[in-house]
Amino acid sequence: MHADYVIYTIGPIVQGPLTKEHERLPASCYTSCLNMAAQNGLKSIAFCCISTGVFMFQNRRAAEIAVETVRKWLAETGSNSRVVFNICKDEDLRIYERILK
């Protein structure tokens, strides 16, 4: 039997200049979700752009944090999990394509 799971997370709402704490929070969201997926034996996970859009996190920096955090987690854990960045906007697609090259 195949089961589907949803791990829901939201990051910070950015009001004013971007701070180190703003940057730490989405990284923590990615790490927590990856850990939870691994603990439950999931082999793949998809992430939307955490904290962007109405949450006002700068798209480029949010993407950098997402990719850096996922790469670090994969390296540290030795996991071969499949991680998908689910991109909805053309602007975000271009950003992720540049970062992932």
Image (cartoon, rainbow, N blue to C red):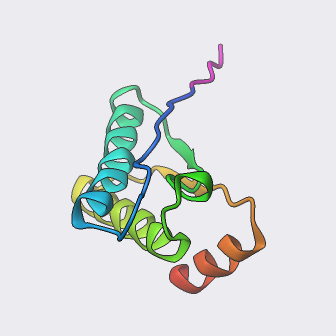
Q: Nearer the viewer, residue 88 or 68?
A: 88
| 32 versus 100 height, above or below | above
- Magenta segment includes 14: no
x, y percent for residue 61? 44, 74
Q: Quadrant of the C terminus?
A: bottom right
The answer to which quarter of the image holds residue 59 is bottom right
Query: Which residue is at the far top?
Result: 1
Total number of numbered labels?
0
- Magenta segment includes 3: yes
- Residue located at (62% from left, 18% from top): 3
Q: Main secondary structure of the magenta part?
A: loop
Query: Which residue is at the far front?
Result: 16
The answer to which quarter of the image holds residue 78 is bottom left
x, y percent for residue 71? 36, 66
- Position of 18 with respect to 24 (left or right) is right
Q: Nearer the viewer, residue 84 or 10?
A: 10
- Residue located at (34% from left, 58% from top): 74
x, y percent for residue 93? 69, 73
Q: Nearer the viewer, residue 76 or 53?
A: 53
- Position of 59 with respect to 28 (left or right) is right
x, y percent for residue 97? 63, 80
| 40 versus 10 height, above or below | above
- Residue located at (68% from left, 81% from top): 94
- Residue located at (48% from left, 34% from top): 42
The span picked out in magenta is 1-5
- Position of 57 with respect to 26 (left or right) is right
Q: Quadrant of the N terminus?
A: top right
